[in-house]
Amino acid sequence: MKIFSKKVLAAVALPVLMTACAANDTKQEQPMKAVTAQDLQHHNWNLVQIDGNPITVTEQNQVPRLEIGEKMTANGNAGCNNFFGQGELKDGQFRIEKWA
């Protein structure tokens, strides 16, 4: 179960970062804006697809989600298990270690 949770957690965290860092798809190239703590904090990020494929949620499971708190604390649900950890934003990259 732990391996599944870590994979789901990684699948939740990756879209968060990809969405936060996504550039506008316009004809003019625009420089990418650095991600700030304010961009990540106080949002409830829901996993809706993996590799372009919509996720399937069963009656027993919740939609996997991730929330980043005031002091970069991370918590959420991996579909069937709750998790939490301490996040860090460094050089425009968000990382969460020591999951519980």
Image (cartoon, rainbow, N blue to C red):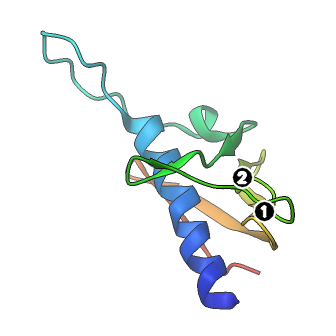
Q: Residue at x 62, y 33 (%)?
A: 38
Badge 2: residue crowd in 10 Å (few <14, some 14–19, many ≥20): many
Query: 25 and 67: which one is in front?
Result: 25
Residue 98 at x, y percent in the picture: 66, 81
Q: Secondary structure at mark 2?
A: strand
Left-right relation of 41 to 16:
right
The disc placed on residue 65 is 2
Left-right relation of 77 to 5:
right
Left-right relation of 68 to 49:
right
Residue 70 at x, y percent in the picture: 78, 45
Q: Residue at x 47, y 36 (%)?
A: 20
Residue designated by label 1: 77
- Is residue 89 depicted above or below 18 in this figure? below
Q: Residue at x 54, y 75 (%)?
A: 7
Query: 81 and 99: which one is in front?
Result: 81
Query: 96 and 62: which one is in front?
Result: 62
